Amino acid sequence: MSIDAVAAPAPGPVAPPRRFLSIDNRLLPPLLITAILITAHLTFGILKGYSRTALAIVTAIATEAVLARVTFGRWPPVASAYVSGISVGILFRSPFLWPYFLASFISILSKYVLRYRGRHLWNPSNFGVSAVLFLAPQTVSLLGIQWGNAVWPMLVIWALGSAIVWRVGRLHVSAAYVLSFVVFALVRAALTGNPWPAALAPITGPMYQLFIFFMVTDPKVAVESKAGQIAVVVVVAFVEMILRLNQVIYAPFYALCLVGPAALALDLSRKAGAPRAVAGS
């Protein structure tokens, strides 16, 4: 292509004007997760110090930058790594610094190492958090706060989160998971004899806001069809119920870590094995 062609492009359809207060979709997840952090911290003081969250964020961004440069020869956008790092910083509770570093490092590393047919299989922060929780359960725990009687922070986050996942075409995933969680929570309450409000309570916490709006909706590790995406989160909620009935701590993270990659690998294998249409047939 000549320089003249670049300098004077052929006439074409005029691009539609940018919407008022429109924001690049890539910036929406960082904005939402930062809003969750600020709201939860102002309401409950969830951060015991800024150093741990900062370490997690810096580790994720630095790891992404190095691996992308070495693997693909380019500098990557930082939005995805920022979300992974701040997720670790919000979720983890540990008196030590190394779990924050390790979880962020593993999260980003999984995108480049654990791949199948050109795709990474795990949501990065889900994998990193689950791995460190499994390997060091005596050292690390997760944020267990619920909003309780402070309903307004939850409503603000749910309204903002729902608007954002709707805009990026993932509202059906979040909605299907929430509905499935509620149904299976009522089933758990009936099976165990526990009061149903206690079974529903976990979904009101900041931890679940990250899970609902970031981990289960990650388009990079989603199956192709909308029906398949809904089926996957229903199975995730079901496996979570089974794990909870067996007293498994951190059941939602382990459930997604088990179900999501298996579903994506199966979907990729199915598409690879499907016969291709012959041109002109």
Image (cartoon, grey):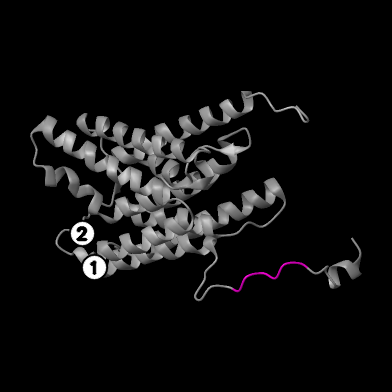
In magenta stretch: residue 13: yes
CA–CA distance in space, label 1 to label 2: 8 Å
Identified at 23% across, 43% down, the residue is 182
Category of crowding for the residue at label 2, using alpha-carbon neighbours closer than 10 angstroms: few (below 14), some (14–19), many (at least 20): some
Q: How many marks?
A: 2
Q: Is residue 105 above or below residue 273?
A: below
Q: Quadrant of the C terminus?
A: top right
Instruction: Report the magenta stretch's main SS.
Output: loop
Report the side of 148 relative to 131 (left or right): left
**Kind of residue at badge 2:** Trp
Q: Position of residue 18 (x, y in %)?
A: 58, 73
**Kind of residue at badge 1:** Thr
Identified at 26% across, 29% down, the residue is 242
- Residue 111, quarter of picture: top right
Identified at 13% across, 30% down, the residue is 191
Q: Position of residue 74 (x, y in %)?
A: 70, 55
Q: Position of residue 14 (x, y in %)?
A: 70, 71
Determine which residue is flagged by label 1: 43
SS class of the residue under badge 1?
helix
User: What is the span of residues highlighted in magenta in the rendered image?
Assistant: 12-17
Q: Which mark is residue 147?
A: 2
Q: Residue furthest bottom?
A: 20
- Mark 1 in CB contact with mark 2 (< 8 angstroms): yes
Q: Position of residue 195 (x, y in %)?
A: 8, 42
Q: Quadrant of the N terminus?
A: bottom right
